[in-house]
């Protein structure tokens, strides 16, 4: 595929991903979002307090991708309601969301056609990422925490990308794993907002 064909496909899948994420949020109970916001120290009492609108993206991401103990997965509930035609772009993106991977990534280099090559710092291996904003703004060597979904030969970001500073990476690497977020304890107060330049369109 040419660069133009890849970007056309990416933009189509990206738009579907955005619509899916918004639709899944509609079926998640408000108390679930409030609980994730509380764990991230984004609440005062029962009110969510944000320094910027971007901060709410993280609790939303966790509510979408991490089911509460004893409850069905939000993406499974959405799939049962939506009933997309098998093989359709909508079904392909939803399945990619159900298989999405959270990890720490390092930008290794630019892809020969378009996008970036990332190295998975937890599992090893490389992934081809297409993200127009990151390709323009993110330098090689940048390390990020992100959830990626792969609906095609290339991967896309889900909802959040957090640049990781080297000293913060070394200090908090074990504690940032998603499984640690399921234990119910508040997370350390670390005000790192999603990068506006990499927010979904």
Image (cartoon, rainbow, N blue to C red):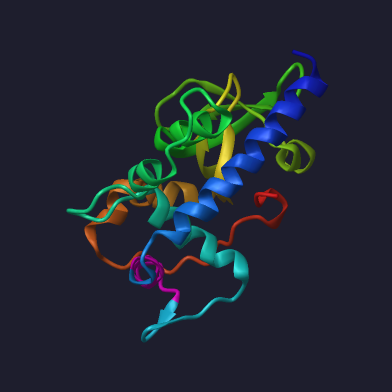
User: x, y (%) of residue 47?
Assistant: 43, 83
| Relative image position of residue 162 (x, y in whole percent) | 56, 51
Please name the predominant secondary structure of the magenta segment in the image: helix
What residue is at 35 percent from the left and 50 percent from the top?
74
Q: Nearer the viewer, residue 152 or 165?
A: 152
Question: Can you say whether 183 is above or below 174 in the image?
Answer: below
Coordinates of residue 62 in the picture (x, y in percent) = 40, 54
Q: Which residues are magenta?
A: 32-42
* Count of marks, rendered view: 0
Q: Position of residue 83 (x, y in %)?
A: 42, 38
Viewer-nearest residue: 16 or 120? 16
Q: Seen from this angle, which residue lies furthest right? A: 4
Q: Residue at x 49, y 59 (%)?
A: 58
Q: Is residue 148 magenta?
A: no
Q: Is residue 124 left or right of residue 69?
A: right
Residue 159 visible in image: no
């Amino acid at each position: 595929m040419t660069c133009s064909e890849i970007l056309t496909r990416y933009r189509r899948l990206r738009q579907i991903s955005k619509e899916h994420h918004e639709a899944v949020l509609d079926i998640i109970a408000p108390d679930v979002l409030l609980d994730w916001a509380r764990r991230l120290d984004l609440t005062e009492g029962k009110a969510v307090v944000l320094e910027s609108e971007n901060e709410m993206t993280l609790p939303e991401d966790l509510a979408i991708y991490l089911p509460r103990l004893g409850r069905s997965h939000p993406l499974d509930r959405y799939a049962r309601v939506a009933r997309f035609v098998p093989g359709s772009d909508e079904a392909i993106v939803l399945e990619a969301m159900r298989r999405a991977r959270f990890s720490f990534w390092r930008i290794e280099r630019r892809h020969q056609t378009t996008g970036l090559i990332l190295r998975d710092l937890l599992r090893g291996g490389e992934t081809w990422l297409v993200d127009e904003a990151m390709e323009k703004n993110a330098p090689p060597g940048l390390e990020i925490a992100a959830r990626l979904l792969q609906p095609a030969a290339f991967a896309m970001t889900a909802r959040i990308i957090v640049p990781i500073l080297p000293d913060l990476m070394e200090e908090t690497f074990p504690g940032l794993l998603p499984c640690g977020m399921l234990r119910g304890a508040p997370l350390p107060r670390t005000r790192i907002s999603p990068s506006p330049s990499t927010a979904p369109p």
